Amino acid sequence: MSGKLIVHLRAHRTKAGLTQAALADAVGVSRKTINTIENGVFTPSTILALTLAEELDCSVHDLFELPDEPD
């Protein structure tokens, strides 16, 4: 299994009309945390992923997915 996560957070955040700072404030983290998640540097905890999904009115799977493994 690959450790790389596919992140769709930026697309959902911009669709919601939120800046990184606004989303960060809404979920109780720093703007830098949102930035590092969006850039694939940091993988959020389950609690943070669920909180982000709730704030953006989508599922965690809409925000994050595992890449397809080659057969």
Image: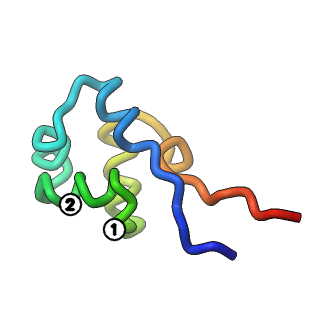
Could you give the CA–CA distance between mark 1 and mark 2, rounded to whole angstroms? Answer: 8 Å
- Residue 11 placement: quadrant: top left
What residue sits 39% from the left and 67% below the top? 43
Residue 46 location in percent, x, y? 42, 66
The front one of 42 and 58 is 42
Q: In the drawing, does residue 17 fall left or right of residue 61?
A: left
The front one of 25 and 66 is 66
Report if the CB atoms under discs 1 and 2 are less than 8 Å apart: yes
Amino acid type, residue under disc 2 in the picture: Thr
Residue 13 location in percent, x, y? 31, 34
Amino acid type, residue under disc 1 in the picture: Phe
Q: Quadrant of the N terminus?
A: bottom right
What residue sits 11% from the left and 43% below the top? 21
Q: Is residue 35 above or below residue 16?
A: below
Q: In the drawing, does residue 10 fall left or right of residue 35?
A: right
The front one of 38 and 27 is 38
Which residue does the numbered mark 1 point to in the structure image? Answer: 42
Q: Secondary structure at mark 2?
A: helix
Residue 31 location in percent, x, y? 13, 52
Toward the right, the furthest residue is 71
Q: Secondary structure at mark 1?
A: loop
- Residue 17 placement: quadrant: top left
Residue 44 visible in image: no
Residue 33, disc: 2
Residue 33 visible in image: yes
Q: Is residue 15 above or below residue 53?
A: above
Residue 64 location in percent, x, y? 50, 52
